[in-house]
Amino acid sequence: MSKTLAAIPVFNEVRHVGRVLREVLHYAEHILVVDDGSWDGTDAVLRYFPQIHTVRHPRNLGYGAALRTAFQFAKEHGYEILVTLDCDGQHEPRRIPEFVRACSQNVDIVSGSRYLKRFPEDGRPPPDRHRINQIITAELNDRLGLRLTDAFCGFKAYRVASLSRLELTENGYAMPLEFWVQVVRWGLRIVELPVPLIYLDENRSFGGALDNAAVRLGVYREVLDASLRRAGIVRPVPRFSIAHMGLGTGCFSEPS
């Protein structure tokens, strides 16, 4: 079995973090929590889990910054596979082994998709989030030659050796856009793995101006444009092969 780390970025998750960590402990031996400057008592809950390593940012730096901390930790401590999942109850820890198995099959990135397959437990996402995800996913596919179905799912597995190639600087929620540009730049192999569409709190805030859907979409487009310029990608690239797993056969299948 590859040496695997499960990492969870956390900011003000006092309501969820204890339950999520208790469940993750059933499916991962090595766990990292990146506490991104929480001030709501999350740190007090984390003290009840001494077996879980915690890295704390002294102030809130952003979702992208928390993921970069997890990437760096995995590289420095010799992990082969890193699985990331959110702490808001959207991601089911019992699926961690599926991500690890998929990433062990000569794959660099296993990305969860909430829109690849229907599950009985599927909910209904907030309309503005679904719409923006669709818009940005389509723009990424067009400009990068991808065939993604979900650009923003935080449930992922990474081959840690491949992360060393990525040049990531974005601190906020737009970091996935920079990430996908870098993945294409370096020709990493991508698999999408279906996961349920679960929303427990439709009123969760992005913070500040990003709670405005139009502003958020504008920020995402600005980060995408800047990331493409830095990567030297000025026109759509040839179609980039993405395998989709778990669609009936349990095997890799190329999209039509």
Image (cartoon, helix red, strand yellow):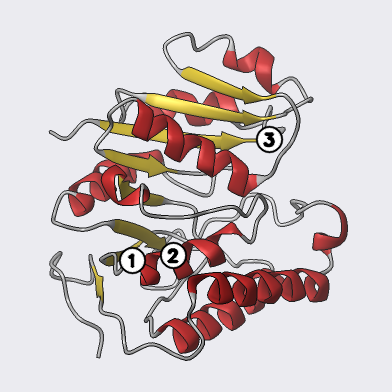
Q: Which residue is mark 2?
A: 182
Looking at the rendering, which quadrant does residue 236 occupy?
A: bottom left
Q: Position of residue 28 (x, y in %)?
A: 31, 29
Dot 2: element: helix
**Label disc, if present, on residue 156 of the rendered structure:** none
Dot 1 or dot 3, earlier in sequence:
3
Contact? badges 2 and 1 (CB < 8 Å): yes
User: Pointer 3: residues within 10 angstroms few (<14), some, or many (20+)?
Assistant: many
Gap in angstroms between the C-alphas marked 2 and 1: 6 Å
Q: Position of residue 25 (x, y in %)?
A: 37, 24
Of the residues shown, which amino acid type is indicated by label 2?
Gln
Foreground label between 1 and 3 = 1
Residue drawn where x is 59% and y is 78% of the image = 136
- Above or below residue 80? Residue 221 is below
Dot 1: element: loop
Q: Is residue 215 left or right of residue 1?
A: right
User: Pointer 1: residues within 10 angstroms few (<14), some, or many (20+)?
Assistant: few
- Above or below residue 232? Residue 77 is above
Q: Which residue is mark 1?
A: 186
Gap in angstroms between the C-alphas marked 2 and 3: 26 Å
Gap in angstroms between the C-alphas marked 1 and 3: 31 Å
Q: Is residue 152 left or right of residue 215?
A: left
Q: Nearer the viewer, residue 60 or 206?
A: 60
Image quarter (top left, top right, bottom left or bottom right) of the C terminus: bottom left
Of the residues shown, which amino acid type is indicated by label 3?
Phe
Image quarter (top left, top right, bottom left or bottom right) of the N terminus: top left
- Above or below residue 32? Residue 167 is below
Foreground label between 2 and 3 = 2
Q: Is residue 3 left or right of residue 8?
A: left
Dot 3: element: loop
**Label disc, if present, on residue 11 of the rendered structure:** 3
